[in-house]
Image: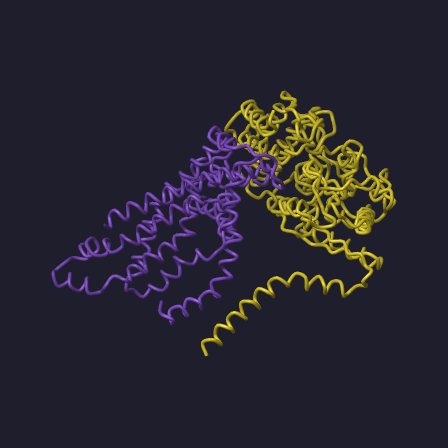
Amino acid sequence: MRKWLIVVSLMLVGALFLTACTGGSEEQADGQSENDKEVIEVEMWNLFAAGDAQYMQNIVDKFNESQSEIFVNNVTQENAQYYTKLMTSVSSGKGPDLAISHMHVLPELVSQGLVTELNDLGKDVGIVWEDFNKNILDATIYDGVHYALPIDIHPQIMYINNELVDQAGLLNEDGTIKMDKSPEGYIEFFKTLKERLPEGTLPFASSSAGGNPYWLWWGFYTQLGGENIVSEDSLENPTYNIDLDKAIQAANFLKDLYHDEEIIRLNVSDYYPDFQAGNAATITAGVWATGTWEITEGLDITPMPIPNVFGEKGAWANSHTFVLPYYQDTDPEVQKAAIEFMDFATDNGAMWAQAGHIPAKKAVIESEEFNELPYRNQYAEVANYGNFADRNIYARGIEEILIGHLDTVWSGEVTAEEAFKKIETEVKELIGE
Amino acid sequence: MNKNLWMRDIKVIPFLLPFLVVYIIFTILPVFKGLEMSFYDWSLIRKIEFVGFENYQKMLFDPHFWRSLWNTTLFVILTTPTMVLLALGLALLANLNSKLKTFFRTAFFLPSILSVAVISFLAIFMLQPYTGLLNTGLHSIGIEAEPFWMADKILSWVSIVVVTLWWSVGFNMVLFLAALQEIPESLYEASEIDGATRWEQFRYITIPQLIPIGRVVILLQILASYKVFAQILLITGGGPAGGTRPLIQYIYEVGFTQNNMGYAATMSYALFYILLIISIIQLRSQRLKES
């Protein structure tokens, strides 16, 4: 009896191990049996959440139905750990055949040799690089080598609540706003909104910490003619290159919105609901918010680029790109299939634009399908001048340092001068200057 | 050895083995790997070069390391006594022979079963300015202030400590409660015959009987508090301006956004040694008192 117990328990343990180990491969076998054996399977990883993930899946489904030679297996990875997982898995040779990368992480992938050059492969498949918006495409080229196919650009823009802005008498007949395009005019616009709207209605919904005010600062810095935080001559060894006067001017301009004029409330943890509920006349947010506003009943909005108040067109922007992870033993057939999908997906950019993003291919922007979508073409021009983060492997660390110290400027804890002194020390330490 | 005993030992092996294998692969090996990494310049994806004690040297002169270590230590100082005393109080309450006994036990322990994401989201919902439950409550009773519970230097600590208390005090309470129920009834009966008051019973029977478990609770609490990370990351993000950023968050940022795994491993080892020393001191003093 006892012996039986031992044998049975050993078998149980063994069985558990076996099922745990074989779970993955079984799934794959299933996936293959659905298709022909000659079908090329391309595994793609993406980091999208909610709406974005669905629109990308729609494109993948359309591609898989459109032909029978290639099957794209679209895997959504958890957003927070995405890049850690992508870099470690690709470097150990176990990553996907195709992946999504944000523009500001691309330098890390390029520098570490984790992505494949696309010049020759692109030629084989018939990619026409001139089809892409130059501003976006240029950011994916390193020393003349293409390392990514851009899908979109997603800048920060401004949205207005038509009803409230009209109520304050600041809406023109043609739907544009009555704002003088100057620093004073910008402030005046919000002051007027504040005066004329009932108490409790916000002139401007935003946060006083994190990404949103940092993006607006970056936009104003660009408008002033500021270009970089660090130089873009080396991915690994950039030099600190901030235009300090302009950086401080932009920061002080924005700081006044919180303090002197009390136009933006301090410390709001989630600034979307105020605008969504119709309690805020304007908001700045990434273009991906368009999708949220348009499904909100009774919300009548107009999107527009961040007003150009300092002379040069400028706005913070990021971009989603397709990359081909690099492996020593790759199947060129799979690589070409992956690029074919990239081309297909960017051709179908109007489907992707449903998420609010601006597609990267020029023909898509001019297409009927894209222009039939509400709102999108009202800010599509930002694709031409949206300013990406500086290209270097420290981009994520630099962004973290900037946000941390700019937050203390918005809160009124330190002056802009003090903050940028600390930013200089920390950024220099990070880049090893 | 007795054959039966030997057979019994053999039989436990298959039950322990699966855990042991997984434990060695995912816990024991990484510990040694981490030690190795701390002596290297090591990026997220590869070993770059051996740098000896350079990472340790850098750590000693890194103001962010010291600031975040202080933040973590402050959290330990704030939470350990409050957590232990509150747990004791709640355990006594839950041990009373009242009709509400089950209710108390459930209510106090309930938050412990929630995940950190859930409690953090609830905390933000209650603490956010303008629309949060707490500030709206203050407004409705006529207080016009707008305290920034998550963005003010001092209030953010109050918020984090109170939220952590609410979330995790239940576990300590259960430990105390179990110990309370272990105290023999005869001690109380005997003291009653001798004419002891309720206070004297508490002072001379309950408290001394709880000291051993109290030591365990304090040690566990210090270790747990030193590992604080997720609720701070989710509620204040380490802000305002790094004012609440704990050491583990800094380690996480260095490791996974700056891709400097070598230095991150070095700081993890610093934390490990701190915890090791505290545990040794604690266990030593306990053994001294017992002997």
Which residue is nearer to you in this view: A9 or B253? A9
Q: Quadrant of residue A26?
A: bottom right
Q: Which residue is drawn at 81% across and 35% down?
A: A134
User: Would you place residue B7 above or below residue A413 in this image?
Assistant: below
User: Would you place residue B241 above or below residue A55 in this image?
Assistant: above
Q: x%, y% of residue A349?
A: 80, 47
Taking A163 as reference, is A376 left or right?
A: right
Colour given to chain B in the rendered image: purple
> Would residue A424 be visible to someone looking at this image?
yes
Which residue is nearer to you in this view: A324 or A188? A324
Which residue is nearer to you in this view: A113 or B238? A113
Which residue is nearer to you in this view: A171 or B127? B127
Q: x%, y% of residue B185?
A: 22, 65
Identify the chain drawn in yellow.
Answer: A
Q: In which quarter of the image is the N terminus of chain B?
A: bottom left
User: Would you place residue B157 above or below residue A414 in this image?
Assistant: below
> Would residue A318 be visible to someone looking at this image?
no
Q: In which quarter of the image is residue B257?
A: top right
Q: Residue furthest top?
A: A245
Q: How many marks?
A: 0
Q: x%, y% of residue B215?
A: 31, 50
Colouring convention used in this rendered image of the protein: by chain
Q: x%, y% of residue A302?
A: 72, 42
Q: Which residue lies furthest to the bottom in this view?
A: A1
Taking A70 as reference, is A319 left or right?
A: left
